[in-house]
Image: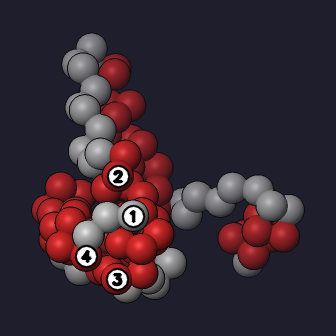
């Protein structure tokens, strides 16, 4: 319901588990005085990931990003490992 309300307000929504899964480890590093890790994916990989999350095929993504299907598939293949995801659902979450 909170996600629906946020969408109706055209506002952001973060699932409560997001802090634990994504934000808390970074805050722990900062509190210990350690450097934050580099961004795990490139800008292009982020674009591909967004389009994958929309349910687009590799061919559609290649057309939208003006690149080859092979390049898109290479990005798609590397994303789960870089982001520690087991499958497409977990990857897009």
Q: Residue furthest right?
A: 9
Q: Which residue is mark 3?
A: 59
Mark 2 and mark 4 lie on one chain; the one further toward the N terminus is 2
Disc number for residue 24: none
Q: Residue at x 34, y 22 (%)?
A: 30
Circles 4 and 3: CB atoms closer than 8 Å: yes
Q: Which residue is mark 1?
A: 66
Q: CA distance from mark 3 to mark 2?
A: 16 Å
Q: Which residue is mark 4?
A: 69
Mark count: 4
Q: CA distance from mark 3 to mark 1?
A: 10 Å
Label 4: how many residues lie within 10 Å, few (<14), some (14-19) or many (20+)? Answer: some
Mark 3 and mark 2 lie on one chain; the one further toward the N terminus is 2
Q: Residue at x 21, y 66 (%)?
A: 71
Q: Image check: 37 left or right of 60?
A: left
Mark 2 and mark 1 lie on one chain; the one further toward the N terminus is 2
Q: Which residue is mark 2?
A: 44
């Amino acid at each position: 319901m909170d996600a629906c309300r946020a969408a109706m307000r055209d506002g952001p929504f973060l699932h409560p588990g997001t802090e634990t899964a994504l934000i808390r480890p970074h805050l722990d590093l900062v509190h210990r005085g350690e450097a934050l890790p580099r961004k795990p994916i490139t800008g292009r990989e982020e674009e591909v990931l967004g389009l994958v999350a929309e349910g687009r095929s590799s061919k559609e993504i290649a057309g939208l990003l003006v690149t080859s299907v092979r390049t898109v598939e290479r990005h798609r293949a590397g994303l789960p490992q870089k982001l520690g995801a087991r499958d497409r659902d977990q990857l897009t979450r």
